[in-house]
Amino acid sequence: MSDYTYQLMAIILYFICMVLIGLFGFSKTKNLGDYMLGGRQLGPVASAMSAGASDMSQWLLMGLPGALYVAGLVEIWMPIALAAGTWLNWKIVAPRLRTYTQVANNSITIPSFLDNRFKDNAKILRVVSGLIILLYFTFYVSSGMVAGGVFFESAFDYKYQTGLMIVGGVTILYTFIGGFLAVSYTDVVQGTMMFLALILVPIFGILATGGFGEMTASAMEFNPDAFSIVSGTTFLGVISLLAWGLGYFGQPHIIIRFMAIKSAKETKAARRIGFGWVTLSLGGAVLTGLVGSAYFQQNPEITLSNPEAVFLSLGQILFHPFIAGLMLAAVLAAIMSTVSSQLLVSSSALVEDIYKTVFKKEASDKFYVNMGRLAVLFISAIAIYFAWEQNDTILGLVKFAWAGFGASFGPVILMSLYWKKFTSSGALWAMIVGAITVFIWGNTPLKNYLYEIVPGFILALIVGCVVSKLTYKHNPEVEEEFDEAVRLAKFED
C-alpha cells in the first residue's frame, strides 16, 4: 500500500471512532441539561482532559509550532502564560463556579448563571452575554474550519475548501447527535492523541537531527536568535504574550467543564491532571517548532511552504505511514475538540439564553434538544461561510476570539464569584465595554503594539467596579446564595 493509503486509513479509523462516541452520547442524552452539560456527571479525568483539549485547539499543533519555527523562543512567553492561566483557572474559578451554578437555580450556561446570580428580571444581561458568545465564537469556530482546510491542503494536497468540509462535516455530525457527553468523551480520546503526538514528534525529531546538541546548533544556523527569549520583541510585546493567561477566566467552552464536574471536591484532582497535560503538551509544541527549524536547515532539499504545517511535515517524514496517519489525526483531534465544544456552547447560548428568554415559550425537553441540534447546524453554516476563503492565520483568528471572551467575560466571572456586592448593571457594562474595546482595538494598528485583551480586561474591570459601587442595593436572596456557594466550595475543598 502507498503512504497515502496508510495515512488515509488511520484518519478514517479516527473519524469512525468519533462518530461512534457521538452515538454513545446520543444514547445517554435524555433532556436539555444532558445535551448541554452532561447532567453534571463528569469525573476529574474527563473534565481535565476535556477542558485541555477544548482549550488547546489547532494552534497547539499548528499555530504555536509555526510561530516557534519562525521566531524562536521569543514566543515562549505565551506558553508560560497559558500554563499559569490553566492552573489559576482550576484553582480560583472551578470550585466556586461549580457550586455557585448549582446554587443559582442549577444554571447550565454562563449567561443563565449570570442571570440567576443577580436575579435580573429584565433578562438583558442574559441576552447580551448570549449575543457576545455568538459573535466571538463565530471567529473562533471559523479558525477551526480554516485549520481543517489547511490540514488537508498540507497533508494530502486536497483543495482547501474540501478539507474544510470534511473536518466540519464529521465534527458537526458527532456534536449534533451526541451533545455534551459526546464532545467531552471525544475530547478525552483527542487529548490523549494530542499529548502522545507532541511527545513523540520532538523526541524522534531530535534523534533525526543528530541529538540535542546538533539540533540546537542547526536551529541557530536557521535562526541565530532561536534560543533568545527577548530578541525581536519589546516590553509591550512580552506583556501581550503574557496577557494570554488572562483569557482563561472568560472562555465559556473551558469554564463550562467546571460546571459539569461531579463536585467541587474533584476539581483539585482535575487541576493536577489538567496542569500536567497542558505543561507537557505546550513543551512538546515548543520543541516541535525548534526541531522543525533544525531539521529543515539540515535538509534544504525539503521545502516547507507553510510554517504552520511544520508538525504535519515532521510527522509524515519521521514515522511509518500508518503512525504518521495517527499523528495527522492528532492534529484533527486538536481542531475538532475545540470546534465541537464551541459549537455546543454557541448552541446553548442561542437556545437557552436567547430563544427561551426572548420568546418565553414552554415546550418539552425533546423540543429544546432538537432546537439545540438545529442551532449547531445554523452556527456551523455561518462559520463555514466566513472560513470559505482563507484570509487570516489560524493563530490570528484564535487570538482575536480569545481576547474577546477574556475581556468581556473574565472580569465578570471573577467579580461574580468573589465580590458579593457586584451588581447586574456592573456586569452588563463591564461585559459590553470589554467586548467593544477588543473589537475596536483588534481592528486598528494598535493591536501590533499591545494585545487587545489588555486594555479590554482592564477597562472592563474598572467599569464593573465603578458601576457596581454606584448601583449596589442590598438583596438578601442574592447575598445568601453567594455565602452558600462560598461555603460549599470551601467545604468540598
Image: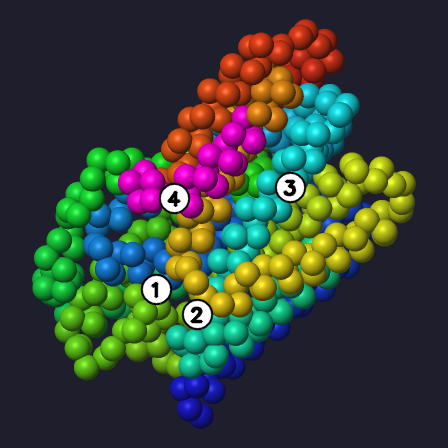
Q: How many marks?
A: 4
Residue type pointed to by label 2: Val
Residue type (three-letter) at the residue carrying disc 4:
Thr
* SS category of the residue bearing label 1: helix
Mark nearer the viewer, 2 or 3: 3
Tell me if label 3 and label 4 are in contact, CB under 8 Å: no
Say few, some or many: other residues with alpha carbon within 10 Å of mark 2 (under 14 / 14 to 19 / 20 or more): many
* Viewer-nearest of discs 3 and 4: 4
Q: Nearer the viewer, mark 1 or mark 4?
A: 4
**How far apart are the alpha carbons under marks 1 and 4?**
25 Å
The type of residue carrying mark 3 is: Leu
Task: Identify the magenta region.
Answer: 430-450
Q: Earlier in the sequence, mark 2 or mark 1?
A: 2
Q: Which residue is identified by label 3?
A: 131
Which residue is identified by label 2? 150
In the rendered structure, the answer to whether residue 358 lies left or right of residue 203 reads right
> From the viewer's perspective, is residue 244 above or below residue 166?
above
Q: Is residue 476 left or right of residue 259?
A: right
**Does residue 400 show up?**
yes
* Dot label at residue 448: none
* Separation of residues labelled 2 and 4 (CA atoms): 27 Å
Q: Which residue is mark 1?
A: 308
**Residue at the disc numbered 4:** 444
Query: Would residue 257 be visible to someone looking at this image?
Result: no
